[in-house]
């Protein structure tokens, strides 16, 4: 994926490979809407570029890495410090396409908690307090990534996805929290199915995209 990025110079390629620059789609301060940390104030860093291709993806504008400016990570760290943020969510796109060592190292130095949102399809780099693994059928997580997840969040678009969620849950650690999240375009249809399923199978929890109800980014 990284090879598909148009780079102005060899220098830019080197900075991208070292993780000193990343294609950034957007940054915003909001509330973590999903999963275990939902309700926490968090600064979001949305990295551009994803080739997983979920047909229901709610941020398809992120997919093409060439439409997002290559940004110095030192600039991102500066931007965050304008806000009273204690938690940072790195998401995308698929952020793990890139080398995340340097950005997480610099962010740890400002004393924030680091949360990652990933499909797990690429090797994970960087240091994280919380990893949310949201596996996708199109491009399965690397085997090694299941044991790194603190939270498994499976998107439920139809009834059959519940069976797939159970299969995915076999691969994570015992301590990993398990979430079923309704796919947004089908939320009204899927919600009652998830509610019944979680009541019958209480190892699972419901995760809602609460930011969409709160009408915040
Ligand atoms: C946009 S993705 C970016 C991070 C990474 N590519 C991933 O999929 O985990 C962020 C989160 O939103 C979830 N998501 C994306 N589209 C969704 C939709 N239409 N309904 C519910 N959740 C969705 C993903 O599964 C993931 O947990
Ligand atoms: N508020 C809010 N919470 C989120 N949690 C995960 C998100 C994501 O797109 O990764 C997200 C998002 O886009 N907004
Ligand atoms: S992996 Fe994430 S960003 Fe990529 S298409 Fe799927 S939901 Fe969207
Ligand atoms: Mg989102």
Image: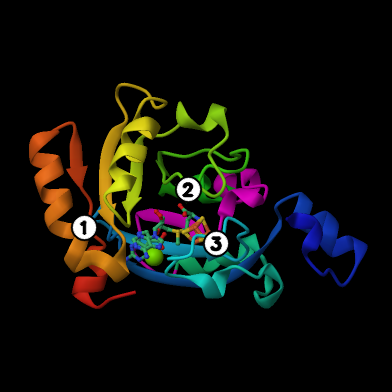
Splitting the image into four quadrants, where does ligand 4 fall? bottom left
Q: Where is 100 relative to 78, above or below?
A: above
- Marker disc for residue 14: none
Which residue: 49% across, 46% down?
Answer: 137
Q: As drawn, is 97 to the left or to the right of 157? A: right
Which residue: 42% across, 46% down?
Answer: 134
Queried whether the magenta region covers residue 104, the answer comes back as yes
Which residue corresponds to mark 2?
136
Q: Are marks 2 and 3 in contact (CB under 8 Å)?
A: no
Q: Where is 109 relative to 85, above or below?
A: above
Which residue corresponds to mark 3?
93
Assign a secondary structure to mark 3. Answer: loop
Which residue: 31% across, 21% down?
Answer: 174
Pointer 2 residue Cβ closer than 8 Å to ligand 3 = yes
Within 10 angstroms of label 2, few (less than 14), some, or many (20 or more) residues? some
Q: Earlier in the sequence, mark 2 or mark 1?
A: 1
Pointer 3 residue Cβ closer than 8 Å to ligand 3 = yes
Q: Distance from label 2 to label 1 (Cα)?
A: 25 Å
Which residue corresponds to mark 1?
39
């Amino acid at each position: 994926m990284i090879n598909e990025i148009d780079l102005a110079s060899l220098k830019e390629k080197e900075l991208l490979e070292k993780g000193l620059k990343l294609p950034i789609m957007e940054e915003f301060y909001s509330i973590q809407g999903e999963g275990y940390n939902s309700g926490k104030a968090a600064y979001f860093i949305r990295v551009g570029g994803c080739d997983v291709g979920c047909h229901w993806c709610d941020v398809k504008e992120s997919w093409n890495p060439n439409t997002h400016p290559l940004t110095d990570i030192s600039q991102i760290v500066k931007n965050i410090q304008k806000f009273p943020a204690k938690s940072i969510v790195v998401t995308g796109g698929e952020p793990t396409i890139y080398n995340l060592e340097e950005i997480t190292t610099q962010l740890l130095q400002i004393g924030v908690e680091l949360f990652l949102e990933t499909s797990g399809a690429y090797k994970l780099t960087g240091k994280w307090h919380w990893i949310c693994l949201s596996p996708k059928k199109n491009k399965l997580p690397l085997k090694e990534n299941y044991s790194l997840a603190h939270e498994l969040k499976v998107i439920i678009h139809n009834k059959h996805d519940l069976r797939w969620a159970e299969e995915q849950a076999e691969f994570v650690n015992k301590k990993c929290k398990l979430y079923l999240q309704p796919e947004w375009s089908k939320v009204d249809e899927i919600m009652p199915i998830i509610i019944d399923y979680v009541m019958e199978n209480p190892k699972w929890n419901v995760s809602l995209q609460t930011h969409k109800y709160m009408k915040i980014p």
